[in-house]
Structure formats: structure tokens, C-alpha cells
């Protein structure tokens, strides 16, 4: 820091310290002003110009030094100078003071901040250079932060000083008028009856509704700006209330809700109704998993008291069954069903031509243009094929194309240790393929806690899967008609010959080819369509949901988001709803199944969230033992010290874990805790009892040593084995000894059947 900057910093710091050290804050309170109001009014009457200038300078100093008191001074300005002159004085004084604070921050700190954090601040700097004035105007109208914070932070950006001044003056004017008017009314209070005066009530009403009006104003200005170049193309009337692009889970639900409220809605799909979930995702994968699981059970015949059992199968027949399952479910998502509901279903490619029109090229070649009040983008996602040399040339399988197989690959390499990769790895291994799973991370299912990843990897190895962790795919070669994956590990290169490679390293949103580029709708760093909390794009009438918008790529979250899109699109002018991701469950359908909702332990630690862990081992559960599935656990994170056992998150591993999770999802969604789950009757013998026993582990962990000592003395007295004095002696321990009597995460702690 240069000498001049240091001197400015010292001067400002000295002034601020003096303000608090000398207790000058007492002079910037409503009580002080009311107590001195008569004297102030007399001085102003005698010296109007001098008092106005003095007030102006003090206001500039307070705001320039970012001291508390500007709000009280604004009210005081109305009381002292009236609405007109009070507004004039405060408007200019606040803007000049804010600009001085802006310049001080820029002079003292900007070079240091930009030098130290320049790379990270590049996107912010670019945004300020492009839209800085509008951002500042929005903050002045509806301050997301206190005004003094805005002054200081803006000084660190490239925003020009003149732009800062005039935008501040304009943006703060409406709020200044409201506060000054409130001050004119406060000055007239002489008794409690004055509190109920119409003028003061109006002032308080204005103060209350101003942020709402200001936000609406900002939204209108933003919309006006973004629609400006399309204004000439806005139709006078519309063919549709809603056009939905994509007929996967998100699109189907959006169209369904629109039809249910008697809206005119068109649904456009260029491939197959039902999207990925029906045709290449959830439905076919679960059908395949079921067949593979049956095979694994047949191989375990001796565990169930059967001397022998075997299965003769053709992989082609298995895949035909998968397609039969898809065909059976297909009518739920069919054109016929949605047409009967009142949805116009079009098969073809869509392109958003303007914020209110969609061009459709039908499969027949015919072209149509539909005008619509609102648009929902539900274009889904597709498998990502990483840029590994030779991979595309080797024609890898993906979660979209694997269903075309009719012959089981003898040797299969699966790239990826996420949910899709793990599910398909276990399936193909159970059908008899030699499967090698390659994952660059140190463990599979990296988003889950380590013990759950370990369970899955161990089961895979037991079933013959070669699990290679910490291996990064480097290249794919074709040598003598044989595919060879070259992977890098700490120990060196590994060559993995195979017949097929299944690429399951993630999915990317479909954001190209239907008009987003032409409309300038931005995408996020992860490649999804950028939306706000109401799922609106930069155009308030264009929404996006499902995989194309993220942040979760699940069928159930796509349907969840679709509700918000459809309701906000139809009724947003009356009330809009913010999308709620607070309780999102998911399941990986391996064996054991891994199901989760909310936080897990590794996330809680990474984010510094206080928590307690309670674990119940399913190997102790009667029904699991009877079923031959005595493995896994229920792991619950709770708020420390909460008497209800408020749940932060749950992870379950074991048979039907996804089904068991539903009870915890409902509890979290509706504010119930483990105490309520523990007090709920669960049928015996069922797997669902594991949830109650996990709640029992939590309850047992709440017992303190003081409580145990008191109860022991009390029951000894009840049976005549001790005196009442011993009970009284234990009373202090009941209150003061809060040490846990049992370990919080002790498994099997509350299973009465094992007692």
C-alpha cells in the first residue's frame, strides 16, 4: 500500500474510531431528535440556509465514512425541512456521500483486491462493465445489502464514477421520498394518539410496500430491456397459452398441469414420447436390473436351503423382455393419452423463433409457427463422451445405445463410477460378462460417504468385477480388431483389452439447435440453461426444467421442477413460487441399493455444519436376516441437541433402500423428527423397522449419565433396596451431568428383538 493510500486509510479509520469512542452515535437516534425537536425547529427558523448547509455536510460525512445514522437523518430531514427541501437535501447529500465512500474504497483497496483476486473477479468485472449501471440501479431500488456495503464493494469494480453517482441519485430517489415523507409525519407526533394518524399510517404503509413496488419496477425494467429487440414481433393475440419443448418427464408434467387447468397447450417431441426415462433410462435399466438380480439369487440357492438351481438364458431374450416392459409402460406417456387429456402433441423439431413464437418442422416435412404466451424448455440431456483419443472411433456404448445389444459382450469396460456406471457394471457382470470398471476418482460413487462406496465396490469385487480406482482413461486403440483401453494410474499405464466400452461418465444438457443461441439465453458453467429461482430464463415468459436446467438429473426432480414451471407460467402474474430443492431424494439401484436424502457426513464436514451421526446396522434386523439380505445400514444425521431429533440427512444401504427412504423424506419435508418416527408403529417383521431402530439409536444417545444414575437410585428405592436419601443425592447429577451414557453412533442399540 502506498504512503498516500495508507494516510487516507488512517484518516478514515481515525474518524470512524472517534465516532464510536466519543459515543457520537447517541446523537443519531430517534429519541435524541424528538427530545431536541423544539430547539432544532427554532434554530432552523432563525437560520434556514445555514442549518440546511450544516445538515447537508453532516449527512455527507456520515455516508462518506459509512457510519450508522443515515436512516435516522433521512427521517429527521423530513421533520426539519419538510418533504420538498428534505428530499432535495438528502438526495444530493446521500449520493455525494456514497460517491465519496466509493472513491475512498477504490483509492485504498481496489488495486490490492484486483491484484490478489483478479482471476476470480474477471467474470464480475466483465458483468459490471457490461451491465454495472443496471445492477447498481436494482440494488439501490431493492437493496440486497446495506447501502454502505454497496458503496464500498462497487468501488472495487470497474464501474465509472459518474455512472455510480447518477445511478445512485436516481435509484435512491424513490426510497428517499418515502423516508422523508415518513419523517414529516413522525415530527407531528405529540401523544400516543398521534401514532394512529392517517398520515403516519400512510407513511408506514409506504415504507412497507416500497420494496415490493421497487422489485416489480426492477423486474419490469429488466423485462423491457431483454424484450426490446423483439418488441415488433410480439403478437397481439396468441395461439397457445403454453408450448412445451420436449416430452420427457419434465415436459409431460408441464403439459399435464397446463391441460388440467384448461390451458391451450402444445407438446413437441422430436424423438419418442416419454423421453430418456421411459426409453433409455429408468424403465429399461430397472427391467435389466431385475433380470440380473434374479440370476444372482439363483446362484445363491444354497443360502436359501436349496441343493441346486440354475438358469439357462439367452441375453437376447433378456433384452427383449426389457423392451416388453418399456412397451407396457409406454401408454402412460403416449400421444393418445395426452391428446385425450387435452394436450396437442406434435412430432417434430422445434425452434424458438422469438420469445412468443415457436417454429415446428413436423416429421412429414410440414412447417408450422405457433404463437404462445409462455414456453417451457424441457429438452433433456444426453450421455457425455469425453475427448479421449480414439474413444469415439471405437464406437462406445452409452446409456442411450446399450439397449440395442442382443449379444452379451464377453469382455466389457465401463468408464465411470457414478450411479449409471455402477448399475450397469453390476448388471453385465451378473449376466456373465468379464467387467472392468475404470474410475479416475479414489472410489466409486464419490458423492456418497466412503463406507457406502466401499460396500458397493466390495460387492462388485465379490461378484467378479475388476474395479480399477484412481485410473484415468488416456487412450483407446484398436489392435488386430480388438479394442484396448489405455489407462494411467500411480503405478503406471494399464492396458485393458475388451470387446465393448460402455461410457458412463455423466450427461450434458441439450442446449443447442432449438433457438437458445439466437435469443441469447445464457447457459451456466455446467452447461445447463441458466434460470432463476422461479425457473425463468432471462425472458420471464420462457422457463426451463428437468435435466436441461439442472441442478439434479433425476426423473422425480424433473417432474418436481415442471410443477413450478407450469404454475408460474400460468399464474405468475398473481403469485410466483420459488423452486424448492430442500428435500431431494435419490437412489442408486445397485445391490446393495444406496439411497439418500439431504446431507451426508462428508458434505456436513466440508461445509462446517454441526451434526450428530446415528447408525443402525441392518445385519441385526429380523426381516433382513430371514430374507438373506442382512447387510447394509441406516445412517442418520441430526441437529445436535434437538429434542425432536430434527433430521439433516439420511443415507441407507441395503435391500429396498429406496423404498425405506420415503419415510425420512416425508419426515424432513413436513418437519418431523426421529422422535416421531420412533413413536410410530412399524409392522413386524418388515425392513421398514430399520427406520424405527435407527431412531432408537438416536434416542438412546440422548440419555445422559446423570439420568441413568438418578433412575438407578430411584428404582432401587422403589424395590426397597435403597433409601430415599440416595434418590435426593442423585438429583444434582440429573441436571448437571450431561455426558452421554451411550455412544451416538452405536449400531443395533435399540432393537428389542436382539435384546
Image: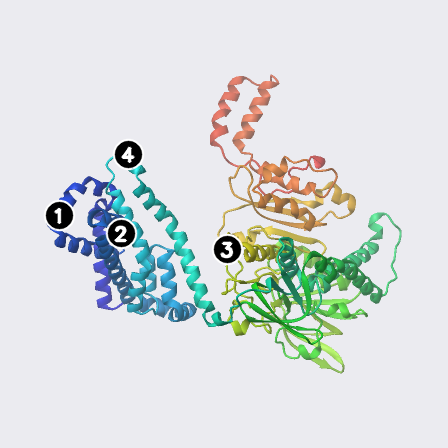
Q: Are marks 3 and 4 in contact (CB under 8 Å)?
A: no
Mark 1, other Cα within 10 Å: few <14 / some 14–19 / many ≥20: few
The colour scheme used here is rainbow
Mark 3, other Cα within 10 Å: few <14 / some 14–19 / many ≥20: few
Using the image, tell me which numbered label, if any, was put on residue 573: 3
Q: Residue furthest left?
A: 46
Which residue matches tag 1? 45
One can see residue 277 in this view:
yes
Secondary element at tag 1: helix
Secondary element at tag 4: helix
Q: Which quadrant of the figure contains the N terminus?
A: bottom left
Using the image, tell me which numbered label, if any, was put on residue 291: none
Secondary element at tag 3: loop
- Point out the tag, 3 or 4, that comes first from the N-terminus: 4
Distance CA(mark 3)–CA(mark 4): 40 Å
Distance CA(mark 2)–CA(mark 1): 23 Å
- Point out the tag, 2 or 1, that comes first from the N-terminus: 1
Q: Tell which of 578 and 449 is nearer to you.
A: 578
Using the image, tell me which numbered label, if any, was put on residue 70: 2
Amino acid at each position: 500500500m502506498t504512503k498516500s493510500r495508507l494516510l487516507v486509510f488512517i484518516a478514515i479509520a481515525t474518524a470512524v474510531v472517534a465516532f464510536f469512542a466519543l459515543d457520537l452515535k447517541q446523537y443519531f437516534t430517534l429519541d435524541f431528535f424528538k427530545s431536541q425537536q423544539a430547539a432544532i425547529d427554532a434554530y432552523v427558523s432563525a437560520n434556514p440556509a445555514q442549518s440546511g448547509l450544516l445538515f447537508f455536510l453532516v449527512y455527507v460525512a456520515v455516508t462518506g465514512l459509512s457510519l450508522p445514522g443515515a436512516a435516522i437523518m433521512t427521517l429527521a430531514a423530513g421533520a426539519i425541512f419538510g418533504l420538498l427541501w428534505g428530499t432535495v437535501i438528502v438526495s444530493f447529500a446521500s449520493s455525494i456521500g456514497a460517491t465519496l465512500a466509493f472513491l475512498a474504497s477504490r483509492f485504498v483497496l481496489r488495486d490490492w483486491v484486483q491484484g490478489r483476486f483478479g482471476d476470480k473477479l474477471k467474470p464480475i468485472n466483465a458483468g459490471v462493465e457490461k451491465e454495472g449501471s443496471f445492477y447498481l440501479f436494482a440494488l439501490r431500488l431493492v437493496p440486497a445489502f446495506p447501502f454502505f456495503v454497496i458503496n464500498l464493494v462497487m468501488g472495487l469494480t470497474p464501474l465509472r464514477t459518474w455512472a455510480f453517482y447518477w445511478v445512485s441519485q436516481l435509484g435512491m430517489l424513490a426510497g428517499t421520498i418515502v423516508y422523508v415523507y415518513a419523517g414529516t409525519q413522525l415530527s407531528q407526533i405529540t401523544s400516543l394518539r398521534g401514532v394512529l394518524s392517517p398520515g403516519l399510517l400512510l407513511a408506514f404503509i409506504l415504507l412497507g410496500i416500497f420494496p415490493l413496488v421497487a422489485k416489480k419496477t426492477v423486474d419490469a425494467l429488466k423485462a423491457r430491456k431483454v424484450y426490446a429487440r423483439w418488441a415488433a414481433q410480439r403478437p397481439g393475440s396468441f395461439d397457445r397459452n403454453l408450448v412445451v419443448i420436449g416430452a420427457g418427464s419434465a415436459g409431460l408434467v408441464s403439459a399435464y398441469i397446463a391441460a388440467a387447468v384448461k390451458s391451450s397447450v402444445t407438446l413437441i417431441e422430436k424423438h419418442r414420447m416419454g423421453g430418456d426415462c421411459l426409453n433409455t433410462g429408468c424403465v429399461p435399466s430397472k427391467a435389466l436390473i431385475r433380470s440380473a438380480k434374479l440370476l444372482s439369487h439363483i446362484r445363491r440357492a444354497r443360502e436359501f436351503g436349496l441343493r441346486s438351481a440354475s438358469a439357462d438364458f439367452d441375453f437376447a431374450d433378456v433384452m427383449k423382455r426389457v423392451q416388453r416392459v418399456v412397451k407396457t409402460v409406454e401408454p402412460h406417456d403416449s400421444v393418445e393419452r395426452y391428446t385425450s387429456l387435452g394436450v396437442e402433441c406434435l412430432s417434430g423439431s422445434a425452434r424458438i423463433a422469438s420469445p412468443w413464437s415457436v417454429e415446428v418442422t413436423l416429421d412429414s416435412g410440414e412447417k408450422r409457427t405457433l404463437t404462445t404466451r409462455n414456453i417451457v424448455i424441457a429438452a433433456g440431456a444426453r450421455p457425455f463422451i469425453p475427448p479421449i483419443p480414439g474413444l469415439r472411433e471405437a464406437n462406445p456404448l452409452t446409456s442411450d445405445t446399450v439397449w440395442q445389444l442382443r449379444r452379451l459382450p464377453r469382455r466389457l469396460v465401463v468408464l465411470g463410477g457414478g450411479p449409471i456406471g455402477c448399475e450397469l457394471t453390476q448388471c453385465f457382470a451378473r449376466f456373465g460378462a468379464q467387467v472392468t470398471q475404470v474410475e479416475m476418482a479414489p472410489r466409486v460413487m464419490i458423492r456418497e460417504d466412503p463406507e457406502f462406496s466401499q460396500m458397493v465396490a466390495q460387492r462388485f469385487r465379490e461378484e467378479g468385477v475388476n474395479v480399477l480406482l484412481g485410473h484415468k482413461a488416456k487412450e483407446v486403440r484398436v489392435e488386430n480388431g480388438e479394442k484396448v483401453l489405455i489407462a494411467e494410474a500411480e503405478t503406471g499405464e494399464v492396458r485393458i483389452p475388451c470387446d465393448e466400452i460402455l461410457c458412463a461418465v455423466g450427461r450434458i444438457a441439450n442446449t443447442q439447435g432449438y433457438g437458445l443461441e439466437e435469443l441469447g439465453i445464457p447457459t451456466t458453467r455446467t452447461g445447463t440453461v441458466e434460470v432463476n429461482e422461479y425457473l425463468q430464463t432471462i425472458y420471464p415468459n420462457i422457463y426451463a426444467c428437468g435435466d436441461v436446467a439442472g441442478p439434479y438429473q433425476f426423473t422425480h426432480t424433473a417432474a418436481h421442477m415442471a410443477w413450478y414451471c407450469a404454475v408460474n407460467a400460468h399464474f405468475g402474474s398473481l403469485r410466483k413460487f420459488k423452486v424448492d430443492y430442500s428435500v431431494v431424494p435419490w437412489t442408486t439401484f445397485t445391490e446393495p441399493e444406496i439411497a439418500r436424502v439431504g446431507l451426508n457426513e462428508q458434505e456436513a464436514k466440508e461445509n462446517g455444519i454441526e451434526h450428530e451421526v446415528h447408525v443402525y446396522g441392518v445385519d441385526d434386523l429380523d426381516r433382513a436376516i430371514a430374507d438373506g439380505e442382512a447387510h447394509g445400514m441406516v445412517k442418520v444425521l441430526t441437529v445436535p441437541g434437538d429434542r425432536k431429533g430434527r433430521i439433516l440427512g439420511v443415507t441407507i444401504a441395503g435391500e429396498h433402500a429406496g423404498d425405506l427412504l420415503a419415510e425420512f423424506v416425508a419426515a424432513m419435508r413436513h418437519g418431523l423428527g426421529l422422535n416421531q418416527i420412533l413413536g410410530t408403529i412399524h409392522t413386524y417383521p418388515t425392513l421398514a423397522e430399520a427406520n424405527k431402530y435407527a431412531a432408537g439409536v438416536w434416542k438412546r444417545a440422548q440419555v445422559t449419565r446423570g439420568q441413568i444414575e438418578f433412575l438407578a437410585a430411584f428404582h432401587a428405592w422403589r424395590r426397597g433396596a435403597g433409601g430415599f436419601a440416595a434418590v435426593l443425592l442423585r438429583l444434582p447429577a440429573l441436571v448437571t451431568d450431561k455426558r452421554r451414557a451411550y455412544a451416538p453412533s452405536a449400531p443395533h442399540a435399540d432393537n428389542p428383538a436382539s435384546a
